[in-house]
Image (tube, helix red, strand yellow):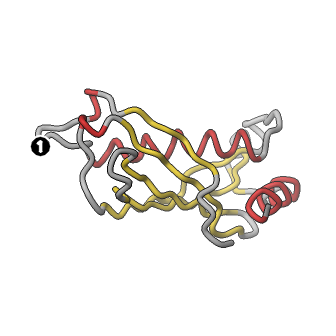
């Protein structure tokens, strides 16, 4: 799937996000993309989910940092899109943009695996989820 960046989340920079070097700490970016991922999943899939029977689990995360974000920048905009769908997993990609300077602060990706928590095993991605994601990304 191609990059759309249509799904966005505005995240205010909190004082607690800033480290000793006066910029957003690298670990905080994982929290930013987690918030964006949850919003994406809730809005695109939009169904009540029994997380014990069919859920998702984070398998991997990768972040490429481009430019630092500081407290004075006030907020970032996280764009999220699905870049790949497999049988049991899917990949989400993210762009984190400084809303003040419009510079791309970081680019990230996560691999999400469909998981049955009560049986502690991977499961195939529900067809309904695939359909909803593809429909959203192609619209």
Q: Residue at x 32, y 51 (%)?
A: 101
The residue pinned by badge 1 equals 21
Q: Is residue 104 left or right of residue 49?
A: left
Q: How many marks?
A: 1
* Residue at the front extreme, as displayed: 101
* Residue at the left extreme, as displayed: 20
- x and y percentages locating residue 23 in the rendered image: 20, 43
Q: Residue at x 54, y 61 (%)?
A: 93
Q: Residue at x 54, y 52 (%)?
A: 79
Q: Is residue 124 left or right of residue 40?
A: right
Q: Is residue 30 left or right of residue 57?
A: left
Mark 1 surroundings within 10 Å by alpha-carbon count, few (fewer than 14), some (14 through 19), many (20 or more): few
Quadrant into which the C terminus falls? bottom right
- x and y percentages locating residue 110 in the rendered image: 52, 59
Where on the picture, by quarter, is residue 53? top right
Q: Residue at x 69, y 42 (%)?
A: 117
Q: Is residue 78 above or below residue 35?
A: below
Q: Nearer the viewer, residue 66 or 109?
A: 66
Where on the picture, by quarter, is residue 1? bottom right
- x and y percentages locating residue 132 in the rendered image: 83, 54
Helix, strand or loop at mark 1: loop
Q: Is residue 22 above or below residue 66?
A: above
- x and y percentages locating residue 84 in the rendered image: 66, 70
Where on the picture, by quarter, is residue 22? top left
């Amino acid at each position: 799937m191609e990059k759309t960046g249509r799904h966005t989340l505005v995240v205010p920079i909190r004082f607690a996000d800033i480290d000793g070097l006066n910029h957003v700490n690298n670990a905080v970016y994982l929290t930013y993309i987690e918030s964006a991922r949850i919003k994406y999943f809730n809005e695109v899939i939009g169904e009540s989910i029994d997380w014990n029977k069919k859920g998702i689990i984070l398998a991997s995360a990768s972040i490429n940092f481009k430019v630092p974000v500081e407290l004075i920048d006030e907020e970032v905009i996280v764009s999220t899109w699905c870049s790949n769908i497999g049988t049991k997993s899917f990949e989400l990609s993210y762009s984190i943009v400084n809303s003040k300077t419009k510079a791309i602060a970081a680019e990230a990706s996560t691999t999400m695996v469909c998981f049955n928590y009560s049986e502690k095993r991977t499961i195939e991605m529900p067809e309904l989820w695939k359909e909803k994601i593809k429909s959203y990304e192609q619209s």
